[in-house]
Each structure stands twice: as C-alpha cells, then as structure tokens.
Image (cartoon, rainbow, N blue to C red):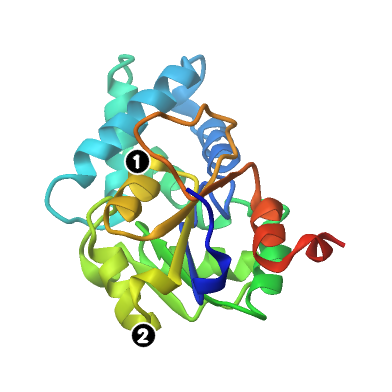
Amino acid sequence: MGLEVERIRALTFDCYGTLVDWDKGIRAALKEVKGLQSFDVERLLREREQAERELLAGPYRIYSGMLGDSLRIAAAAQGRTLHYGEILAFVNTMSRWPPFPDSGKVLRRLAVQYTLGILSNVETKVLSLSIKQIGAPFVAQITAEDIHSYKPAPKHWEEGLKRLHLPRENVLHVASSLYHDIRPAHALGFATVWINRRNEPVPEDIEPDAVFPDLGGLMQALLGPAAAT
C-alpha cells in the first residue's frame, strides 16, 4: 500500500508521542516523584501503560485521573504507595512536556496546503497548552473531554470528519501509536502514516500507507523533496 497524496485534503494528528515527546516528558516527570526513587523505571513505564489501557477501556473519566491512577497502580506493583500530592504533581507536568524539534516547523509548512486537526485522549486545557508550545494552527481540536470517549474507540475520528467537513478518503491520520491510532484508524478506512519514533519493527498484522521515523519524511512525501530545504 502506498500514500495517495493527490486525494489528501486534511491531516489529523495524535499529539503525545507524535508531536510532543511523551518518552522524554514522562521520564523527566517521574524523576521528580520522590516516592519513586530507586524504582525499576522501565518496569514502571510498562506497567503504567498497561494499567492505562485497561482504565481507558472502562467508563469515561477525566484523563488526568486516569493518568494518576495508572501511576499509582504501577507503583503499587513494586510495593510503593504514592501520596496524593506526588501523583498530582506528576499529572500536572504534562502540559509542559516538550514538543519534538521537528513538530512546529513541519506543521506550519503543512498548514499552508492542508487543513490540520488533532485528536487527543487528554483534556482540553492540557492539549491547548501543548499546542501553544508546538506553535501550529489546528482547525479541529478534539479531546476525550469533548466527546467522553478514548481512542482506540472510533468517536475521535467520527467527530473529526464532522468538524473537517470532509469524507474519510480525503483525510490522512498521522500518529506514533499503533494501538491507540494506527490500527483503529486503518480499521475505519482512513489512510494512515505511522511516525515510528521509537524505531520499532513494523508488525505483520497492520500495513500503514507509509512509515517515517519523524515528521520530516511526512513533509517530503506530501510537499516534495524541496520542502526539506
């Protein structure tokens, strides 16, 4: 499968992990939690992510609560009970997590030719602060708080089509998470680009329309090689 550039009118993006450096942000935030000193950080990250997936599959609650609960569950698995203040301080760092160096520049270039949307599982205020850091013009900003639903459920994409006023064949979804974004968007019939920032192997059960290690590759594919200069 290849990227059919001529039919694309709009791009929708995941934010955290794709435009904002999730790994750098969460690791820095964990270092600030005194109750996690001497922890197995890699295990904590794995178990927190799994706990979050299970929480997101349940009834809707605000994402900051989900994020905090996932940290509490992962810490408890290593025998540590975190205080409420520690969890709150951790959660409140999210809006300060840094964008990837390529995010703002590439998105501003793409916005000249394409309508941009962003689909995120976080609450509206946090996403707005992250978008200010990125410095890009998103016409549609859809959060879980808006629609009371979490990806990989389909409601983000359904709402995105309503706000963009386009059929799905004219929309390209761009993301780094196979679980939250690429698989569900592909299943819904969207063209997809996987931004493989972690340099993971391409799984056999999903075929994105294109795979790039960063947003620079996407920009060249959509705007041509001269866009890199």
Q: Amino acid at mark 2?
A: His
- Can you identify the residue that label 2 sits on? 165
User: Considering the numbered disc 1 on the image, is that residue within a helix, a strand or a loop?
Assistant: helix
Give residue 26's position: percent from left, percent from top: 52, 39
Identified at 51% across, 14% down, the residue is: 38
Q: Which label belongs to residue 179?
A: 1
Q: Is residue 110 left or right of residue 172?
A: right
Q: Residues within 10 Å of mark 1 (few under 14, many from 20)?
A: few
Give residue 68's position: percent from left, percent from top: 33, 42
Res 81 seen here: no
Identified at 83% across, 64% down, the residue is: 226
Identified at 53% across, 29% down, the residue is: 200
The mark total stands at: 2
Q: Amino acid at mark 1?
A: Tyr
Please report whichever mark, 1 or 2, sits nearer to the chain's N-terminal start: 2
Quarter that holds the C terminus: bottom right
Q: Is residue 75 above or below residue 23?
A: above
